[in-house]
Image (cartoon, rainbow, N blue to C red):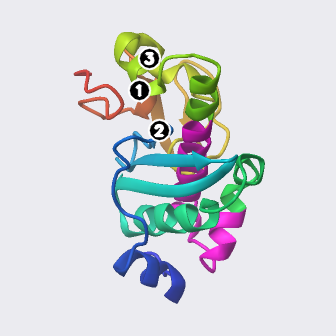
């Protein structure tokens, strides 16, 4: 079991800002197909500032602690300030994360970033991201980069993506394009049987 800092344990045992904002100005979702962590962030924006930030997370203790910390770090910030929150800043605020759990801080920062992008899209008259996702399921995984969803390291390309640090072979879901573990039976992104 990874060794967690006292702050990680505190934010896991007593998470802040858990819940959903019914009339959210932006919603962002991010998940890790290998470990099954899924984070959804909801933001409310008033006069260019995040007046409220809430989250729902399904995952390990580190994922819950990260979500809680990201919500606290973003609340009250301007849109531009919130965009500058990085995975490393989140991990540092939590007193560090074990290497095998650092991907959680990536997910938290990315989910917040998606919520902000959704808000900005709505301001331009675009459909909310969650509605776009439902109407274009084949595009869900289009954002995926060539990095391991487990540890975040770059993947070696070839016949199938392979992560050296995790020593696992990965593949992509034929329906949504998310990178998933080679032995996955179901895609955590879209639910497709593999």
Question: Do the residues bearing badges 2 and 1 touch, measured as CB atoms within 8 Å?
Answer: yes
The answer to whether 87 is drawn above or below residue 73 in the figure is above
The answer to whether 96 is drawn above or below residue 43 in the figure is below
User: Residue 173: where, in percent of width, then height?
Assistant: 39, 21
Q: Which residues are magenta?
A: 89-116
Dot 2 corresponds to which residue? Answer: 27
The answer to whether 61 is drawn above or below residue 32 in the figure is below
- Looking at marks 2 and 1 on the same chain, the residue that comes earlier in the sequence is marked by 2
Of 28 and 80, nearer the camera is: 80
* Label 1 crowd bin: few (<14), some (14–19), many (20+), radius 10 Å: some
The residue located at (50%, 38%) in the rendering is 25
Q: SS class of the residue under badge 3?
A: helix
Q: Is residue 43 magenta?
A: no
The residue located at (51%, 42%) in the rendering is 149
Q: Determine whether, in the image, residue 80 is placed left or right of residue 58.
A: right
The quarter of the rendered structure image containing the C terminus is top left
Q: Determine whether, in the image, residue 40 is placed left or right of residue 110.
A: left
Question: Do the residues bearing badges 3 and 1 touch, measured as CB atoms within 8 Å?
Answer: yes
Q: Is residue 97 magenta?
A: yes
Q: SS class of the residue under badge 1?
A: helix
Residue 156, image quadrant: top right
Q: CA distance from mark 2 to mark 3?
A: 12 Å
Q: Determine whether, in the image, residue 126 is placed left or right of residue 41.
A: right
User: Residue 63: where, in percent of width, then height?
Assistant: 44, 61
Evaluate whether residue 5 shows in this view: no
Q: CA distance from mark 2 to mark 1?
A: 7 Å
Dot 3 corresponds to which residue? Answer: 132
Dot 1 corresponds to which residue? Answer: 130
Residue 13, image quadrant: bottom left
């Amino acid at each position: 079991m990874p060794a967690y800092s006292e702050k990680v344990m505190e934010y896991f045992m007593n998470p802040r800002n858990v819940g959903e904002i019914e009339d959210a100005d932006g919603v962002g979702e991010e998940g890790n197909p290998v470990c099954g962590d899924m984070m959804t962030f909801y933001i409310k924006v008033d006069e260019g500032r995040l007046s409220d930030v809430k989250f729902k997370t399904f995952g390990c203790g580190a994922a819950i602690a990260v979500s809680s910390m990201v919500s606290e770090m973003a609340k009250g910030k301007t849109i531009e300030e919130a965009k500058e929150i990085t995975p490393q800043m989140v991990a540092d605020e939590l007193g560090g994360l074990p290497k095998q759990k650092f991907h959680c801080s990536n997910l938290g920062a990315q989910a917040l970033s998606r919520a902000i992008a959704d808000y900005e899209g709505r301001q331009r008259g675009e459909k909310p991201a969650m509605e776009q996702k439902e109407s274009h399921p084949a595009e869900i995984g289009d954002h995926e980069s060539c990095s391991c969803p487990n540890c975040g390291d770059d993947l070696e390309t070839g016949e199938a993506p392979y992560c050296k640090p995790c020593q696992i072979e990965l593949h992509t879901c034929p329906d949504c394009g998310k990178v998933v573990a080679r032995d996955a039976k179901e895609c955590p992104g879209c639910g497709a049987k593999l």
